[in-house]
Amino acid sequence: MRKPVVIGVTGGSGSGKTSVTRAIYNKFKGHSILMIEQDSYYKDQAHLPFEERLKTNYDHPLAFDNELLYEHIKMLQNNQSIEKPVYDYALHTRSEEVIQVEPRDVIILEGILVLEDERLRELMDIKLYVDTDADIRIIRRLSRDIKERGRTLDSVIDQYVNVVRPMHNQFIEPTKRYADIIIPEGGHNHVAIDLMVTKIQTILEQKSFL
């Protein structure tokens, strides 16, 4: 049985980790590859009143259902399909909808805390940390949240100062030490992305996938 290649991609909010993930994914279009977003695995909060759900700190490790995420990655590695959860950000809990995901030769696991959990790290063949300066990350977050999510400038800054920044310093930045490769400036670093693509191709060839 051929075991899939698992690639972990992490970095702070606004670092460009999603751009890196998509760039790698697009390089392998036509091949057997899938993306799993850690954001899909926020814990189900249906048992909590809505007012309590609003207090959720989505940048803390305890916000994620890593038990289920670990189980699903293991299932995919064993060539079993999974039902990936869908998170409803309007209701701040897990949706009743699920997405059927079939096993693939390459699995990219992307999220701010995918390297924080030792069990998840042990499943990965390659671990990437996208390292971008804090001033760039906050500018990107401001632009995204105001344009795409209808947030006010003050609310974005308040959340960044009181939640995002301290959680980054406490939980995300320290996971850099687990990375095999650190990619500065995210999706704009085409050299690093091309090197990653070449590395993945080599692994796949060794496993006779390509």
Image (cartoon, grey):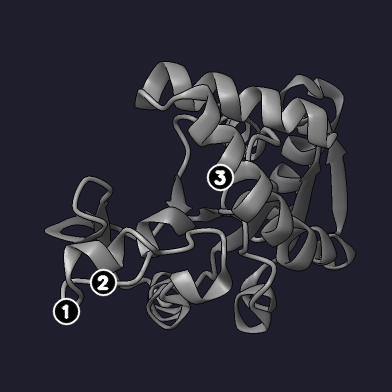
Q: Could you tell me residue 110's position as x and y percent? A: 56, 52
Q: Nearer the viewer, mark 3 or mark 2?
A: 3
Give the mark, 3 or 2, whose residue is nearer the N terminus: 2
Q: Nearer the viewer, mark 1 or mark 2?
A: 1
Vertical relation: 154 (above or below) 41 = above
Residue at the image point whose x is 59% and y is 30% from the top:
141
Q: Seen in the image, is 208 located left or right of residue 48?
A: right
Quadrant housing residue 201: top right
Q: Nearer the viewer, mark 1 or mark 3?
A: 3
Specify few, some or many for label 3: CA neighbours under 10 Å numbering under 14, 14-19, or 20 or more. few
Give the mark, 1 or 3, whose residue is nearer the N terminus: 1
Q: CA distance from mark 1 to mark 3?
A: 25 Å
Q: Seen in the image, is 75 located left or right of residue 98?
A: right
Q: Seen in the image, is 30 located left or right of residue 174?
A: left
Q: Using the image, tell me which numbered label, if any, was put on residue 159.
A: 3
Q: Could you tell me residue 4's position as x and y percent? A: 54, 64
Quadrant housing residue 188: top right
Q: Seen in the image, is 71 located left or right of residue 131?
A: left
Do callouts 3 and 2 mark residues in contact (Cβ within 8 Å)?
no
Q: CA distance from mark 3 to mark 2?
A: 22 Å
Specify few, some or many for label 1: CA neighbours under 10 Å numbering under 14, 14-19, or 20 or more. few
| Residue located beneath label 2 in the image | 44
Residue at the image point whose x is 30% and y is 58% from the top:
102
Q: Amino acid at mark 1?
A: His
Residue at the image point whose x is 65% and y is 61% from the top:
207
Residue 181 seen in the figure: yes
Do callouts 1 and 2 mark residues in contact (Cβ within 8 Å)?
yes
Residue at the image point whose x is 52% and y is 69% from the top:
2
